[in-house]
Structure formats: C-alpha cells, structure tokens
Amino acid sequence: MQTTRCSSHRPALGELAPLSHQSKPGLTLKISDWKFWSYTDGSCHTQEGKTVIGAGVYHPSLGNSHLVEPNGAGINNTIGRAELAAIAAAITHDHTQIATDSLTSLHQIRKQLLYPEKHRHHVQGDLKI
C-alpha cells in the first residue's frame, strides 16, 4: 500500500465552507468535533475494460488528504480492499478517530481482532498495516 499527499481543493484551515445542514434549521451535528476525525473511503470503477481501485484519507482540521494505492490485482482488486487500505493508511498515519462508510470493513476488522485464525488464508491477507 502506498500513500501520496495530495493538494487540497478545500477551504484553507480556519476558513469555513458552507455546510449543507445550514439550509435546514432543524438539523444539528451529531459529532461536534467532526473536524478532528479522519474520513476514509475506497472506490472501484471500470476504465477501458479494467477494474481500477483507489482510496483516500481526509483529515479536516489538518487540511490534508492522502491518496492510497491499494495495490490490488486479480481476485483481490476489489472495493473491499480499497476500503480496508484507506483505513489501514489512516492508522499508519497515527489517526485514532476514523470514520468510514464501509460496514463490511468494520466487520472484517472485528473478525480479525477476535478470530485471527480465520484470516490465515484470507484473499486480502497481504494487506498489512
């Protein structure tokens, strides 16, 4: 797994971007310190007949984002691998509060922690932190 810092097209640190919840007065933030969390995501698409995966980590208070190369090939070139690679990259960069939209990744991490013997021959077993 490789990570690359990318230039941000987001507001500079200290500047506020318009938040979508401001247009609906009844909505409130569920996490007041959301800027101190790291947000991860993976993606998968087909380009010229080939499956391409990628991932990223974004940390609002630091104003940085990292592109992650999941290095998948063949059977392990999947969205699941991309999602897990993003989470692994966040951990590698010492982020401790991590948000993901991948319930499957959370289940896989839990399974690895509770039953490591079940992952001895897992298809994504080469994905290391």
Image: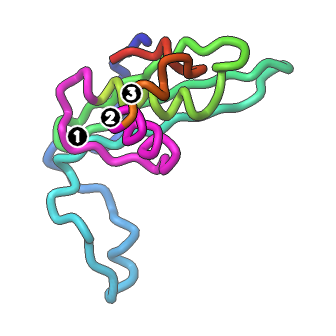
Labels 3 & 2 near each other (Cβ < 8 A)? yes
State the separation of the CA atoms marked 1 and 2. 38 Å
Q: Which residues are magenta?
A: 91-114
Which comes sooner in the sequence, label 1 or label 3? 1
Can you give x and y, in whole percent of width and height, for residue 32 in the image? Answer: 16, 65
Quadrant in the picture for residue 93: top left
**In this rendering, the label closer to the viewer, 1 or 3:** 3
Residue 124 in percent (x, y) is at 54, 21
Q: Residues within 10 Å of mark 2 (few under 14, many from 20)?
A: few
- Rendered location of residue 62, percent (x, y): 18, 35
Query: Could you tell whether 2 is left or right of 64 in the image?
Result: right
Q: Which residue is mark 1?
A: 12
In the image, residue 73 lies in the stretch drawn in magenta: no
Disc on res. 116: 3
Q: Amino acid at mark 2?
A: Leu
Indicate whether 128 appears above or below 96. above
Quadrant in the picture for residue 106: top left
* Residue at the disc numbered 2: 113
Q: Nearer the viewer, residue 120 or 24?
A: 120
Kind of residue indicated by mark 1: Ala
- The disc labelled 3 sits on which kind of residue? Pro
Tag 1's secondary structure? Answer: loop
> N-terminal of the two: label 1 or label 2?
1
What residue appears at the point 49 percent right and 47 percent down from the top-left corner? Answer: 102
